[in-house]
Image (spheres, rainbow, N blue to C red):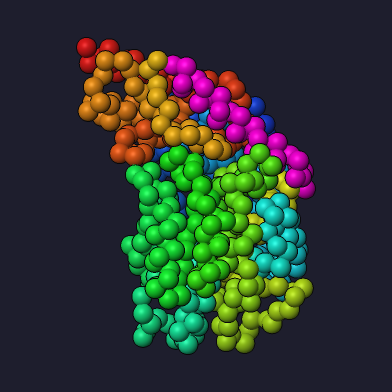
Amino acid sequence: MMGDPLNAREDAAEALGMVARAAGTYLDALPHLPVRDATHAHLVDDLDGPLPEAGDGTIAAVADLLRIGTRAATHSSGPRFFHLVVGGATPAAQAADWVTSLLDQAGGLWVASPLAAHAETVVLRWLKELFGLPASYGGVLTPSATFANLTGLTCARYWWARRHGVDVTADGLVGLPRLPVFSSGYVHPSSRKALQLLGLGRDSVRTLTRDDAGRLDVDALDRELASSGPAVLIGNAGEVNGGDFDPLDEMADLAERHGAWLHVDGAFGLFAAVSPRTAGLVRGVERADSVAADGHKWLNVPYESGMAFVRDRSLLGRAFGGWNSPYLPEQDEVRVNYNSLGPESSRRARAFPIWATLRAYGRDGHRAMVERHQDLALRLGRRVEESPDLELLAPITVFVVCFRYRPPGVPEEALDDLNRRLGEELLEDGRVYAGTTVYRGRVALRPAIVNWRTTDEDVDLLASVVREIGARLLTAEA
């Protein structure tokens, strides 16, 4: 059969060479490209069409994907993508991700790949050292912070059910009361999604706040825990709109006093631990029962990369293992089967890019990146405060800058609509990317500066483009 890949095995090296050659040109241009080029948007339609019968062959397919992808992709790995919280991929991490695809290891079972399993063990140890977490914590790599939150909260659910005399892994939730879950107004949708998947309810979280920003009311939490019975607290190391942090140390105190489980969603904020300048923001995380973080944010490794850590390492195996499948090999402290410690069975060897970036740049390099991004956020904050038509809405903690366009003479009731339209125009313009949110009842921009390539020039461009588009909108209304 002409389409059988066995007949095209000699094309594999040439196809990879095509990608490598295209990469040089693309990466050289990336710092100067608009984040989204509307003139190439139509190219995505070239992906469509009927399923080929015989196929066009390896070289033609890869050439077409390169032609379309390098032009029509959102250049989110470049220095001017400030939307969401998305890092780029450091050179070491990106190259290692190619190695990951080249070797195509089954990362879940030791017997399938001792290389992948050992790499995961090493990077989990390195990450604990980087974050200041105790070496005794168990851990597992996940595809994302959502999966990391799911992992930590699954262990919390097992712990809670055992407090009620139930093995939830074996018997499920039948007969159990509702699990009390408390957080601040900073709780992220990914934590809610994890609770939803666990059958605990997306809206089961009780948010205890002391202001309209969502800051935690610690005294109210203390009172609730006094009568709730075994409960789960979700602490948020980094809030997506303004970048604020929950008081993790105080939450850890309450968890110890009341016998509660403290889970910390540190998707991006856990990396504040890397620098002495910002480490105080996550003081107390080393006392948490479970911790989640995301590698494709501030670590700057490619998608998909998350990590979960659990104080009682045995809970990972109890919550996710015990499949009673005779074909699956047993494990020990050295020959770890990571698919029995997390929600995935089929797993990519996602440790390789993390290993490469930590090996390449070390603790010092990642501290420098954290501090540089904070400096860039503060620089953008100064540009906002110096501009008569911009308004800073939240204090800058790490890398999120929450602000809005507020030109003189525009009434307050018109500002939300103006900023919403500005956000839409900003994405359509494509030179820089930053989305809108609603912060303390006001529509705002909230650029996140986490890409290793981003420089002073890029954040200055963001401020100037926002003002340019805002002025254009005002002129159009006049």
- State the image coordinates of residue 360 (x, y, percent, origin top left): 77, 43
Q: Magenta: predominant secondary structure element?
A: helix
Q: Quadrant of the N terminus?
A: bottom right
On screen, residue 184 above or below 312: above
Q: Nearer the viewer, residue 193 or 286?
A: 286
Total label count?
0
- State the image coordinates of residue 311 (x, y, percent, origin top left): 63, 68
Q: Quadrant of the C terminus?
A: top left
Quick check: can you spot residue 272? yes
Give the quadrant of residue 137: bottom right
Residue at 40% across, 15% down:
388
Left or right: residue 302 versus residue 234 is right
Report the magenta residues as a range. Answer: 359-387
Residue at 34% across, 22% down:
406
Q: Is residue 367 magenta?
A: yes
Q: Nearer the viewer, residue 115 or 248?
A: 248
- State the image coordinates of residue 86 (x, y, percent, origin top left): 53, 41
Left or right: residue 438 versus residue 266 is left
Q: Nearer the viewer, residue 355 or 137?
A: 137
On screen, residue 226 above or below 148: below
Residue at 60% across, 56% down:
284
On screen, residue 393 above or below 466: below
Left or right: residue 193 versus residue 137 is left
- State the image coordinates of residue 205 (x, y, percent, origin top left): 37, 62
